[in-house]
Image (cartoon, rainbow, N blue to C red):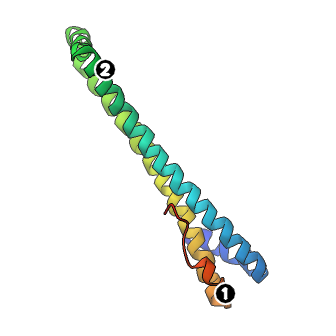
């Protein structure tokens, strides 16, 4: 989180009552949990589905499917380049999606930590029930 964003959060929290800071912490914790779950789902979907597709297509066709795809593109001029560029594009898109999801999770975690630190500075006590995190973390 940049210094400018940190200052925005600090000035926003300065005008809030202790009860509102407690509520904002719950919102931040929920937001962090949702970002974490979204990143997990993104990883599962974007990694598992292509692997499942490749495995099933190989098993169902006894490998003939991939032989046909290879023959189709290998015989065409620039066919290997088409296969490699498609694979590279897919990996780049996957990388961008995962980096974006990880950055959103990092921002959610940073906001929660800023609220916790601000509350500690003001002496706002959340209670023992807030010491634990959500079950899915």
72 vs 128, left or right, is left
The quarter of the displayed image where residue 17 is located: bottom right
| Label 1 Cα neighbours within 10 Å, binned few <14 / some 14-19 / many ≥20 | few
At which x and y percent is residue 87? 31, 29
Q: How many labels does the image show?
A: 2
At which x and y percent is residue 108? 57, 63
Query: Alpha-carbon distance for marks 1 and 2?
Result: 57 Å
x 68%, y 65%: residue: 27
x 56%, y 74%: residue: 113
Residue 95 lies, with reference to residue 23, above or below; the image says: above
114 vs 59, left or right, is right
x 65%, y 84%: residue: 127
119 vs 64, left or right, is right
At which x and y percent is residue 134? 55, 66
| Residue 89 in sight | no
| Residue 105 in sight | yes
Q: Which mark is residue 50?
A: none
The residue identified by callout 2 is: 57
Q: What element carries label 1?
A: loop
Q: What element carries label 2?
A: helix
| Label 2 Cα neighbours within 10 Å, binned few <14 / some 14-19 / many ≥20 | some
Residue 121 lies, with reference to residue 134, above or below; the image says: below
At which x and y percent is residue 26? 67, 69
Chain-order first, disc 1 or disc 2 = 2
The quarter of the displayed image where residue 15 is located: bottom right
x 68%, y 87%: residue: 124
Of 29 and 10, nearer the camera is: 29
Q: Residue 125 carries which label?
A: 1
Q: Do the residues labelled 1 and 2 touch (CB within 8 Å)?
A: no
Of 125 and 71, nearer the camera is: 125
The quarter of the displayed image where residue 7 is located: bottom right
Of 110 and 48, nearer the camera is: 48
């Amino acid at each position: 989180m940049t210094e400018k964003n940190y200052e925005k959060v600090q000035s926003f929290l300065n005008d809030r009552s202790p009860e509102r800071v407690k509520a904002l912490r719950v919102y931040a914790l929920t937001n962090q949990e949702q970002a974490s779950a979204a990143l997990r789902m993104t990883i599962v979907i974007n990694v598992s589905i292509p692997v499942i597709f490749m495995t099933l297509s190989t098993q169902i066709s006894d490998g003939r499917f991939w032989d046909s795809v290879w023959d189709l593109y290998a015989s065409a001029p620039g066919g290997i380049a088409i296969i490699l560029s498609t694979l590279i594009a897919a990996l780049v898109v996957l990388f961008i999606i995962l980096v974006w999801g990880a950055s959103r999770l990092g921002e959610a975690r940073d906001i929660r930590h800023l609220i916790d630190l601000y509350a500690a500075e003001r002496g706002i006590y959340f209670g023992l029930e807030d010491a634990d995190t959500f079950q899915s973390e």
